[in-house]
Image: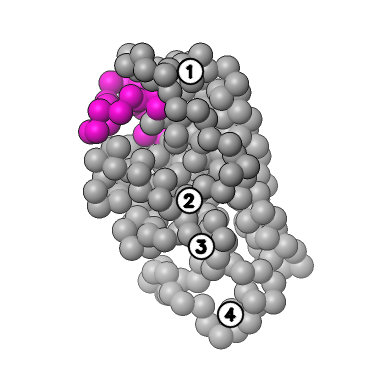
Amino acid sequence: MSSSPDDADVGPLVADLVRTLQELEEEFEPRTERGLPRPPSPRELMRFTSDVGIPGVILLLRTNIEALKLLQRALRMADGRTPTTGTGSTEVRQRAEQLSRTTLSRLDGALADLQDAVEGRPEDDDARELLDEARGLQNQVEAKLRERADDDPAADSTDSGVPAEPVPDESVPVDVDAELESIKEEFGDGNGDSEGDATGDGDGSGDDRETGDQGDGSGDDAGN
């Protein structure tokens, strides 16, 4: 099974968006002198409360990162890897695309909140540049996913020839956290990790921030 031109087209965009969101997370998350995440100081907490709920936005960024990593893996299944449960790769890819569309729709509000947070803070030029880049990539990825949903002839059946489940209505609330875990299980990720998918180049960089305990429960917070 070979990858389609659409897969090759959207894959680099997804990888770029993952990297940009990770950089945004680093830009806004308070860190120690050693570069480790830390709780916000009282002064920072007052600023977060008055400007924007940045901790909640960071959780939403992480949720998008995890969903996009799973989409990367689903796209790469075209290279020959199959899920451990035997579910068709087409079905898993469609679910990953649906989940990414859901999280990306919520990302728009998060980026708007972050934009509000940096207004009037001229020292945050890097953050503004990252936000502009993230918005551009978000729009491109969303457009590609919409095109794939409209044009993919495989959407009517799974790899085994069995009719596929109907595409979920995007207006219906999605339990993002549960769907993340379900798709991870399709890949055999019992520990919840998505190693090697952070940047699209297989080096696994950036995984330490959003996997494990920090990744758990992010969907619930982001979806509320």
Q: Which residue is mark 3?
A: 221
Q: Which residue is mark 1?
A: 156
Q: Is 218 situated above or below 41?
A: above
- Secondary structure, mark 3, is helix
Q: Which residue is mark 4?
A: 45
**Mark 1 residue type:** Asp
Mark 4–mark 1 distance (CA, rounded to whole Å): 49 Å
Where does the image place residue 176, in percent across and percent down from the top left?
47, 50
Q: Is 97 situated above or below 1?
A: below
- Which residue is rendered at x = 30% and y = 37% of the image? 186
**How crowded is the residue under tag 4: few (<14 C-alpha within 10 Å), some, or many (20+)?**
some
Mark 2 or 4: in front is 2
Where does the image place residue 19, in percent across and percent down from the top left?
48, 45
**How crowded is the residue under tag 1: few (<14 C-alpha within 10 Å), some, or many (20+)?**
some
User: Does the magenta segment cover residue 82?
Assistant: yes
Magenta range is 72-91
**Mark 3 residue type:** Asp
Q: Which residue is mark 2?
A: 175
Mark 1–mark 3 distance (CA, rounded to whole Å): 33 Å
Residue 19 visible? The answer is: no
Q: Is 16 situated above or below 36?
A: above
Q: Earlier in the sequence, mark 2 or mark 4?
A: 4
When asked about the image quadrant of residue 126, the answer is bottom right
Mark 1 or 3: in front is 1
Image-based side of 206 in relation to 174, left or right: left
